[in-house]
């Protein structure tokens, strides 16, 4: 795609006007433009210098819709409660933890409000205690955690009932990375928070358990067959992989994902499942090849 910098900037600014995409950075949009561009739209973008006319083009409007839809799939669809002031909640948490413990009721209440700002973590709120209890009954309590495509899931740390684990989080959305970086500092979590595009990133810290919550379907929609490659790059004793069992509209999903269990079987990896109202978790024990 050969665009003038002016037109590229105009296009990206227009795409990111939607409130649910405000945490997405401009450099995340450019690769998607490359993917969805067609010949007609390229000609319009190369020839049109007037921003007002540029954005009136039906071809350009369609391009904007396509890119926004893809961004929502990767990130935007999970955001809830856009008006919630996460920074203020973190301020309150910081004040509380100066006087009370992480597992105090005041702390847990604030954690619940923070987790409620993200669709996946909001759906897990009533189940977090039982989810981690069931997972760690199988895996044992981990001393190190790798959380890929984590969103705000590391904020469920108080519900894990662990003693000072090393927690390494990797997330695509820069807004969530910033939030988690501050959160780790406030609660004193050891480890790291880094931005990573899991379509390409393949170097991760070693861990006892690796969380991949509602991640694999998203990646497979982008690049078929990527799951096998990603699993091969993770050095962990257990993978905790979850899938949604309901659509965003609340309808039951009938997908069996045999392709996924075929991968596990082909590697000789054993697994157990844990189910909640909205999600199924595969607790996978890794067999070194």
Image (cartoon, rainbow, N blue to C red):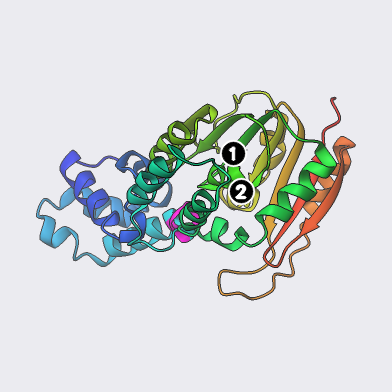
Contact between marks 1 and 2 (CB within 8 A): the answer is yes
Q: Earlier in the sequence, mark 1 or mark 2?
A: 1
Q: Position of residue 253 (x, y in %)?
A: 70, 70
In-image side of 35 versus 128 (left or right):
left
Which one is in front, 3 or 247? 247
Q: Residue at x 37, y 48 (%)?
A: 92
In-image side of 174 versus 12 (left or right):
right
Local crowd size for mark 2, using a 10 Å CA cut-off: few (<14), some (14–19), many (≥20): some
Q: Is residue 107 above or below residue 168?
A: below
User: Would you identify the image quadrant in which residue 28 lies?
Assistant: top left
Which residue is disc 1 drawn over?
148
Is the stretch drawn in magenta largely helix, strand or loop? helix
Q: Magenta stretch: residue 74 in it? A: yes
Q: Where, quadrant-wise, is the N terminus in this rendering?
A: top left
Region rendered in magenta: 72-77
Q: Which mark is residue 215?
A: 2
């Amino acid at each position: 795609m050969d665009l003038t910098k002016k037109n590229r900037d105009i296009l990206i600014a227009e795409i990111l006007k939607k409130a649910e995409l405000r945490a997405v950075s401009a450099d995340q949009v450019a690769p998607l433009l490359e993917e969805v561009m067609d010949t007609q739209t390229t000609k319009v973008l190369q020839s049109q210098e007037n921003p007002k006319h540029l954005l009136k083009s039906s071809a350009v409007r369609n391009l904007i819709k396509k890119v926004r839809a893809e961004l929502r799939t990767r990130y935007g669809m999970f955001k809830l409660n856009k008006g919630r002031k996460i920074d203020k909640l973190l301020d309150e948490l910081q004040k509380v933890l100066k006087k009370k413990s992480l597992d105090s009721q005041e702390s847990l209440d604030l954690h619940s409000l923070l987790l409620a700002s993200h669709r996946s973590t909001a759906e897990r709120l009533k189940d977090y205690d039982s989810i981690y209890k069931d997972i760690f009954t199988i895996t044992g309590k981990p001393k190190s955690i790798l959380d890929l495509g984590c969103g705000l899931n590391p904020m469920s740390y108080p519900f894990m009932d662990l003693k000072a684990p090393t927690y390494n989080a990797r997330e695509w959305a820069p807004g969530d990375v910033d939030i988690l970086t501050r959160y780790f500092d406030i609660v004193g979590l050891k480890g790291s928070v880094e931005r990573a595009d899991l379509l390409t990133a393949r170097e991760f810290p070693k861990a006892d358990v690796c969380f991949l919550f509602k991640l694999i379907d998203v990646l497979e929609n982008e690049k078929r067959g990527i799951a096998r490659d990603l699993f091969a790059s993770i050095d962990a004793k257990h993978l905790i992989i979850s899938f949604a069992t309901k659509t965003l509209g609340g309808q039951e999903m009938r997908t069996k994902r045999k392709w996924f269990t075929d991968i596990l079987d082909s590697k000789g990896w054993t697994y157990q499942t844990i189910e909640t109202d909205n999600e199924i978790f595969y607790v996978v024990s890794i067999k070194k090849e």
